[in-house]
Amino acid sequence: MDSQTLYPSDLNVEQRAALQTSLVILQKNYKFQRVLLWGKVLGLKADYFIAQGRGEDEMKDRKNLYSLNCVDWFLLPPATVPLIDQVSSAAKGRFTGDPSHVYEHRDIRRRGDGDEEEEVVTKVNEEIRLAVTVHHIEEEVSVVPRGAFVKSPHGLVQINRSFCGLSYSESEKLDSFLHFSKPKNLKKKSLLETSQLNPAIDFLDVLSDDIPKGSWSLQFECGSKVCVLRSLLWLGLTFYHLPMTPHHGYFYIGDGAKNLDLPFML
Amino acid sequence: MERKQDSSEGTLQAVALLKTTMLKQSSKSGLNLNPAADKVMVDSRKLRSTGLHSDVSMKDTPTELELTENVCTLAHISVKLSYSYDHLTRVLIKVMDEQPQDVVDVIEDISRDVKRALFEDKQSILRDLPQTTAAELLAEQQRPLFSRPENNEQEDELQQETPLPNVSEIAFYLEQAGVGLGREEMQRIFLALKQLVESQELLCCRLWGKILGTVSSYIVAEAECREGEEEEEPISDEAAEEEERETETQESDENEMDPLPQSTYKPPPVVPKEPIGTGTNKCVYYVCKEPGLPWVKLPSVSPAQIAAARQIRKFFNGKLEAPVNSYPPFPGNEANYLRAQIARISAGTQVSPQGFFQTGEEEGDEEDEAPRDSYEVNSDFEGVPVNEMAESLSTWVHHGHHILPQGRCIWINMAVNSEDLNEEGEAEEKEEPDEPEPEVGPPLLTPLSQDVEMFNTPPWTSKMSSTLTPQHAVAVLRSNLWPGAFAYACGGKKFENIYVGWGLKYAGEGYSPPLPPQPQREYPSDSEITEALDPSLEEEQALKEVLEEQQDAQEELEDTDEEDEDDG
């Protein structure tokens, strides 16, 4: 969500005011092109506010920062594959709210011969867990409307300045929304399907290809003034778009837990 | 003047030249429009030469020659003959009208402008079809929210106690707490609540919260109903009548044939619903999709529905009549499921500052075991300072009645009832079941500090809304078991509960649906129905021989008897 525009109602006035100031300072310090308020991860004792700074390339130059009081921001480490493995084995339960909290996981592994047993302890910081969670959410459920971003022939992804919004009929279909992460399904599509697409704007996966079908809830609020997409896989991710205007954005507010029971619930 | 005339002549010549080039083009492309094309070509050359002469006489830049040349190039480019002919005439007319300085430089722009002007003209002919968008429909529906009825006098309204709480204040505090739906939305919801109160004549009404669904969401209002309201249950009566009819027909059929083995399975007796005004059905709930749309009353909840709701995990759809496909099968449709979840959430998360409510004074010391089921507002409540409320959980108490595993708030002994209901049954041997132990839950108004921790998470998280100005802050309580349930308390006597969420309980690591029950035991084996092997041929023959021998022996005996009788 853009730092200049709307704020969700889940932030109180004091937080909003603090954010408006601190995000501007953040942008200056880190030399970001723009800073977005990404969301809020709720912990047991305290909540984390997450902000995302975008650089030249909107998709690759993304940096996440977190804060406990909306004023002091700390950079989150980028999520690499070994970190992701560590977190998936060790971190369980809810976020506590303390960035230095350590999750431990003891695993008894046998060495090659089979006689010696070794106890492997994986320890993970809550900060790292937060970074990995944010990375997962970004990869799986970040949404942008079709046409909002263009990919130049060099591969640079940038905001489309002449995007004037989806029409009302377009925003009723899930086809007009794309994942804002590296596409996985695009190459599997047949030539027939890709012939209709425009390579400058259709370089991302479409939401309607998500499995299981029905993992997105598309609703219109206030009549048809705002189109709201809610993810049922990561409960708390909300995407909004005002049709016929270039305003769009997504925000996550939740406890950072993936909804693995989704197939039961649909 | 001369120049103008010359120019007009030149343009006319150019037009004529164009026409000829068009024809030439047509002959090239195979469209046979004019057989005398060649002759025309000769004429065009003549025209051109005359044009040259006229141009040479003028000292200005040879605009017209270049003009005609440009026109020819344009003609070559465009394929659609009639269009380009008309278009070029229009361009040239425009050039003649406007007389720009350097026609050659701007001729393409003029051509583009003429083309664009064409499109706009056509579009202005179309009339807009008035289509009402959804936003307009909703706006129309929400307009009556803001209209004041003219009958009521203003004085009466100010003096009466309204069944609604102070709406703007609640919206403000919810905003401070960081919960809610946005100021304008809350205002509209409260106006819709006012409409509800007036239409249904409710005693007391408050906003319970919002439950999100996949297709649309529900805004839920909680109300205490009038006394003496009975619920109509025509559906269950009809079902009972149908069952009776079915059993009668079955019996008549069975009299003709041999009686089939009857199943000895008796479903466990249905736990009766709690009457309206007590326990789980203490309050009545109304839902609507958007403020301004009509409110729908939810049916009261039964213990079977609560028990089933505890075992399933399903999203809400948004339509009240939608079926709930789940295992174990939910007895009812989405309206019942919604009501059951609302009951569970209310029981688990409706909290108030300690001392705000007190139990009724009628119950003395004798009834310590019986659960306290009524509470009243404590008029002596002075209020607890906010930072204390935020720090310790013992300053908050539940005022929602805990639901027992049975599905009710007040336990009922089912064994007692089953004897009364069993009238039609034959005189079977009844084994009296052991007296089930009464289910006990925590009594009303227990402090939150006694809430059990589930899944290694404390059940509540509390904090202050603002750390920078704690004097005016609000204490906020957030439930970890029911994500989305909030409560706030402000200094004095103000507090409120609200729920904004998906209507699902926190299930820990993962949800696993309950396994299907064990298959039922086979019918007890009897001599009538046990299978025996058919006797083989040798055995039958052996049996036959044995029987024949017996018969012979008997006949001999009879013969000897007769002989004896004859003899004797």
Image (cartoon, coloured by chain):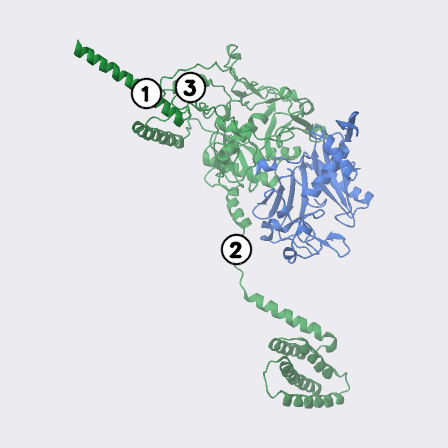
Chain colours: A blue, B green
Q: Compare marks 2 and 1 and give the one earlier in the sequence.
A: 2
Determine whether, in the image, residue A261 is placed left or right of residue A32: left
Q: Are marks 2 and 3 on the same chain?
A: yes
Q: Chain of mark 1?
A: B
Residue at the image position 70 percent from the left and 82 percent from the top: B68
Characterize the local packing of mark 1: few (<14), some (14-19) or many (20 or more) Cα atoms within 10 angstroms.
few
Tag 2's secondary structure?
loop
Tag 3's secondary structure?
helix
Characterize the local packing of mark 3: few (<14), some (14-19) or many (20 or more) Cα atoms within 10 angstroms.
few
Q: Chain of mark 3?
A: B
Spatial CA distance of label 2 from label 3 is 62 Å
Q: Is residue B155 visible?
A: no
In the image, which disc is placed on residue B547? Answer: 1
Residue wearing tag 3: B418
Q: Compare marks 1 and 3 and give the one earlier in the sequence.
A: 3
Whole-percent x, y for residue B384 in the image: 65, 22
In the image, which disc is placed on residue B131? Answer: 2
Determine whether, in the image, residue B489 is placed left or right of residue B219: right
Q: Nearer the viewer, residue A181 or A111?
A: A111
